[in-house]
């Protein structure tokens, strides 16, 4: 299995952010989490990548997913 580089832009109060992080943890997938509620630079970076303020924004290698689309994420991780 190839190791994927996973980044999640999230906020502490976002339900779907928690679901996404729990999913990665359950799957044994390491990820980098940026709290865009507190980190203005990472919020700006997320906006540049996604074009919106909705969270979570998940980047797997160079592919972007906005929201917690478990099926799409699983496909991206398997590819």
Image (tube, rainbow, N blue to C red):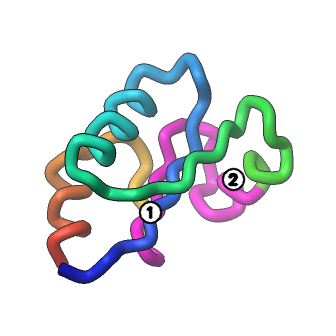
Q: Residues within 10 Å of mark 2 (few under 14, many from 20)?
A: some
Q: Residue furthest right?
A: 40
- Name the image quarter holding residue 35: top right
Q: Residue drawn 16% across and 71% down?
A: 78
Q: For the residue labelled by badge 1, is the local secondary structure a helix, a strand or a loop?
A: strand
What is the tally of numbered marks visible in this picture? 2
Q: Residue furthest bottom?
A: 2
Q: For the residue labelled by badge 2, is the local secondary structure a helix, a strand or a loop?
A: helix
* 3D distance between C-alphas at marks 1 and 2: 17 Å
Which stretch did the figure color magenta? 45-62
Q: Residue 71 versus residue 52: which sits nearer the camera?
A: 71
Q: Work out which quarter of the rendered image holds the N terminus and state it.
A: bottom left
Q: Residue 74 versus residue 53: which sits nearer the camera?
A: 74
Q: Residue drawn 50% across and 23% down?
A: 14
Q: Work out which quarter of the rendered image holds the C terminus and state it.
A: bottom left
**Residue indicated by mark 2:** 47
Tell me residue 77's x, y (percent).
23, 67
* Mark 1 or mark 2: whose residue is earlier in sequence: 1
Q: Residue 2 versus residue 53: which sits nearer the camera?
A: 2
State left or right for residue 20 relative to residue 70. Answer: right
Q: Residue drawn 80% across and 41% down?
A: 39
- Name the image quarter holding residue 48: bottom right
Above or below for 35 versus 9:
above
Please name which of the two marks, 1 or 2, marks the residue nearer to the observer: 1
Tell me the tag on residue 6: 1
Above or below for 63 versus 70:
below
**In magenta stretch: residue 48:** yes
Q: Residues within 10 Å of mark 1 (few under 14, many from 20)?
A: some
Tell me residue 69's x, y (percent).
26, 45
Q: Residue 5 versus residue 40: which sits nearer the camera?
A: 5
């Amino acid at each position: 299995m190839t190791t994927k580089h996973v980044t999640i832009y999230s906020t502490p109060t976002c339900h779907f952010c928690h679901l996404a992080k729990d999913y990665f943890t359950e799957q044994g997938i390491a990820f980098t989490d940026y709290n865009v509620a507190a980190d203005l630079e990472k919020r700006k970076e997320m906006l540049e990548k996604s074009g919106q303020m909705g969270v979570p924004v998940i980047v797997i290698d160079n592919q972007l997913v906005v929201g917690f689309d478990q099926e799409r994420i699983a496909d991206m991780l398997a590819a």
